[in-house]
Amino acid sequence: MNSKGGQRRLGRHLILVVGAIYFAFPFIAMARFAFQNVQVFNLGRATLFDGWSLSVVTNAFREDYFWEALRLSLQLATGTALLTLFILVPTAVWVHLRIPRARVIVEFLTVLPYVIPAIALVAGIVVIKPHARWFLNSDLSLIPFYAVLALPFTYRSIDAGLRAIDLRTLTEASRSLGAGWNTTLMRVLIPSLKSALISSTFLTIAVVLGEYTIADVLLKRTLPAFMAEYRQSDPRGGYALAVMSLLATTLLFAGIGIATRSKTRRSEVTDESSLKMEETPT
Amino acid sequence: MTSLSLEHVTKTYGSTIALNDFSLAIESGELVSLLGPSGCGKTTALRVVAGFEVPATGSVLVGGADVSKTPAHRRNMGMVFQSYSLFPNMNVAQNIEFGLRTRRLTPVERKKRVDEALELVQLQKQAKRYSHQLSGGQQQRVALARALAIRPDVLLLDEPLSALDAKVRSTLRDEIRRIQRESGTTAVFVTHDQDEALSISDRVGVMSDGRLEQLAAPEVVYSNPSSAFVARFVGTINEVDGVVEDGAVHIGPYRFRAPSPRRADGPIKVLIRPEHTRFDENGFPAMVRQSVFMGASKIVDVQADGLSNLIRVQLPGHATSPEPGSRVLISFDESKVLTDQ
């Protein structure tokens, strides 16, 4: 039993190590290319610690366009996250409560942006462009498109959150206590879905910070568009920014993990204390 | 204190009729239990009263006013659910305060009512705890306090004890009754547990197929069931095959006058409770299969000659019971016999 458990644990660790190597090696290679002031053909084990510098990034930071692009990307991320929450949470709640049978259809629809390449969406945008210039001229016009692109991730996150709570009972309890739909949503459901909403928001931000195709076609100067352009004039700087962006996204996901884990641990601790309370009648 | 009535309510789900011309009238301050098997429509009736379901026909009257078209959040109904329904993001006091906030009461009034409600369910010390820090029984007590704090016209209890263990269940059942009596709130209690319904209610409504079979005081429902369905559903009952001939019921050599309503000649089911069954030298022959001591009573199962099913006899706990395998004669308290053709 013990040796079996040990083997299983060893297997898990092995998979983790292999996975980490699979992701870490390209990342390290990219980081070395970007941050080591060493000729590419000299990059090897012997030069592992030579010539590391952040100057390529600081150079990129000196570009006015970088800060504009970063600001726009952050605005788009915020806008997309808000639009997603504003539309998706009530929709998902409605589907769960009123038309639970339609959940499969909604799941299918929300996965489509993942299946259909972004370029197909771009083709659609090109068709409507002449009729919607007033809208598409604005930098923030990317928000609805990004909300669609993020759907496969955000809907699943919110859906999982809704499945984890007793949605019907909480809603009916709130309504029976005199709360209308808005109060129920704002004061009962959204706070109960906090973890799901945080993870949905982080996923949205990750999608926005990584999207290039639509921004490029619509000539919007977002951070990924800036990086692609900057890479042409300074390849090392462009890749340095890509490493930084990847690092920021990874930190976001680590944030989700920590937030979720600490919540789980808290409930485990309180479950133990409530069990003790069950034993002592009040 | 407010009365409640449902008048000719029908509710369907597709081709399934959940409530079929259902009518019920409850007096102010009364606690009525709706009892019945799964799918009989008791929870649907409660949900129609709460405003969570819209009936196809009929109306719901609270204090004489028709609330059929009033949305759930404007009905002033307090509801306690089967599953734990406390808001996980709020502590006990905040949960109780929730309904008072929606009613825009002043902070002073809110605090007063929260304190009163906590005192009512004796959970003052748990006021700052969250739902995951409470036991199941405590959570249901908070749910009860929360429902009562808004001073509802009607308190609706949808199997609030079914998720609890037997001991907590019994304590909380008594507590619900005490609190309901003290507050004088009109209440509807839905349950499939007959002991719960009989012990807690002023009147019990037994439901079957979306209809009310009988609505009466618990003693009446038990001792004078209006139909074979009610007799079978409430309490334990013996079913014995008999034959009606010339106004008399024959069970083998045993014969007695058929109870009203008069049945046509032919085969009949005789329904009789174990406590109305006795050992009697004028009865019909049977063999004792087993005898079980239950404390206050003894249960003796006998196999009557020529009959397929066992008949249960209930004796006082101190009575001497025949040994398994011995021959006995049994008869019924004929005034308590029900028949079903």
Image (cartoon, rainbow, N blue to C red):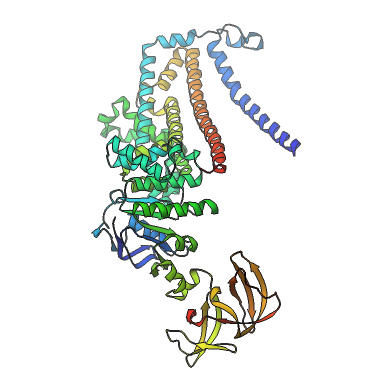
**Left or right of B297 on screen, residue B337:** left
Residue B220, horizontal then vertical, whole percent: 42, 71
Residue A25 in which image quadrant: top right
Residue, x 59% and y 72% (percent of image)?
A: B315
Q: Single out the residue that lies furthest toward the bottom.
A: B246
Residue A230 vs residue A159, the one in the foreground: A159
Indicate left or right for B199 with B240 as reference: left
Query: Would you place residue B131 above or below residue B36 in this image?
Result: above
Residue drawn where x is 32% and y is 44% of the image: A179
**Between A48 and B149, the one nearer to me in the picture:** B149
Q: Is residue B159 above or below residue A214?
A: below
**Which residue shows up at 43% across the image and 66% down it?**
B218
Image position, residue B46 (x, y; %):
37, 58
Camera-side residue of B215 and B87? B215
Is B132 above or below relative to A70? below
**Residue B211 visible to the viewer:** yes
Residue lying at the far top in this picture: please name it: A51
Within the image, what quadrant is residue A1 found in?
A: top right
Residue A202: x and y in percent read 45, 29
| Residue B85 in view, yes or no | no
- Give the residue at the far left of this rendering: B65
Q: Quadrant of the N terminus of chain B?
A: bottom left
